[in-house]
Amino acid sequence: MAAGAIVYDAVYKDHDTGNHIESSSRMDAIIERIQEDEHARRIPRVKPAKATVDQVRANHDPNYVASVRQLAQAGGGWLDLDTYCSSKSYDVALLAVGGAICAVDAVAADASNAVAVVRPPGHHAVRDKAMGFCIFNNVACAAKYALSHHDIDRILIVDWDVHHGNGTQASFYDDAHVLYASTHQQPFYPGTGDFEEVGSGEGEGFTVNLPLRPGVNDESFFYAYDHLFIPIAKQFEPQLTFISAGQDVHYADPIGGMLVTSDGFRGLTERIKSATPRGKVIACLEGGYNLQALADSVLAVCGSLFDFPTRINDDAVDQGVSKHVCDRVDKAITIQSEYWQL
Ligand SMILES: [Zn+2]
């Protein structure tokens, strides 16, 4: 079993969203599952520090950052139609960014890989506004931190959340240092992430989108990774890889319509590791709203990243690679072949 790091702080539960589906009980479910597992409980836990305002401003408009602080200080309120800010949410959102940054520092030191169990999630947050339960973009801020504070200039971000990570894509759309690759349900919130969104300027070819209809199972996701994401990632040769780990692609998730099993997340993580042979991998929590499925899936990711066995007895869901996915992968390959050997 490799020495890794699980970044977590109970303070994440202080982002009080009431009866919202993105609730503090997600943290309890994950941490209890880790604690129950004889291997996972031995992975070192690291408590993060809050990100500095400058670390957040590296990816966000200073006026927006200040507006979140002011709303929290005033007692809280809605940042957008589905993103709530409680009185403590500004500080917790800084700690979520700090958690992703802490994971960067941990793997840059001696941790093999890292898992950041953080909330609020981040991948929808754009430069000047909150979106889709996300206040600050944790992975985007941490990637910018890694580029500026460590000897790293090629970062891969694989986003398997059922929703497209519009905020992360936008952060690096014209940047060749960060390759953003996303599978997501379409049509679905937030409506971005079509095949033709491939980046612009120096970043053209460094955004890879594979929008999918609902009902995609493990084997079909593996097929997409094996034929599209992983060949591109291996040519890119990332020095550091983030997984925007949204477990709302699990078949039991109440929001998403995908069919990934808990064990399936291990298969995806193994593939991402194989594409990062000389670098470290950080899985940073995004969505995932069935508590049992979320906890099991995070355990499977930990098992892959920290090299311990996991076998989660999910109900078998239909298997086999669907023609729909083959067709979608073919279309993406046609578009991406302009930039990569596929
Ligand atoms: Zn999501």
Image: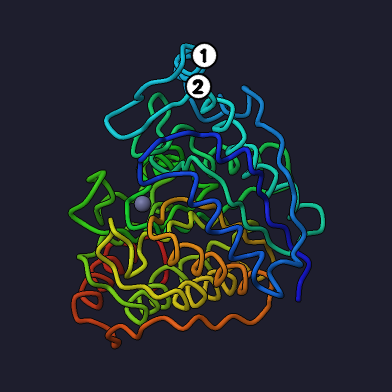
**Residue kind at label 2, given as amino acid type:** Ser
Instruction: Give x and y (percent) for residue 41.
Output: 71, 66
At a point 25% along the width and 57% down the height, the residue shown is: 195
Q: Residue drawn at (30%, 62%), measured in percent from left and top?
A: 210
Please give the count of numbered marks on the rendered protein.
Answer: 2
**Gap in Å between the C-alphas at discs 2 and 1?**
6 Å
Image quadrant in which you'd find residue 3 = bottom right
Query: What residue occupies the far front of the structure in this picture?
Result: 19
Vertical relation: 159 (above or below) 71: below
Residue 77's x, y, as percent? 37, 21
Comes first in the chain, label 2 or label 1: 1
The residue that label 1 is drawn on is: 73
Instruction: Where is residue 333? Give x, y as percent.
Output: 31, 69
User: Tag 1's secondary structure?
Assistant: helix
> Where is residue 183 shown, x and y percent of the image?
34, 61
17 relative to 108 in the view: left or right: left
Q: Secondary structure at mark 2?
A: loop
Are dots 2 and 1 in contact, CB under 8 Å? Answer: yes
Left or right, 251 with respect to 101, comes to left
Closest to the observer: 146 or 190? 190
> Which is nearer the eye, 119 or 238?
119
Q: What's the residue at 48%, 57% (across, down)?
A: 245
Quadrant (top left/top right/bottom left/bottom right) for the C terminus: bottom left
For badge 1, the amino acid type reads Gln
Where is mark 2, residue-wise?
87
Note whether residue 147 is visible. Answer: no
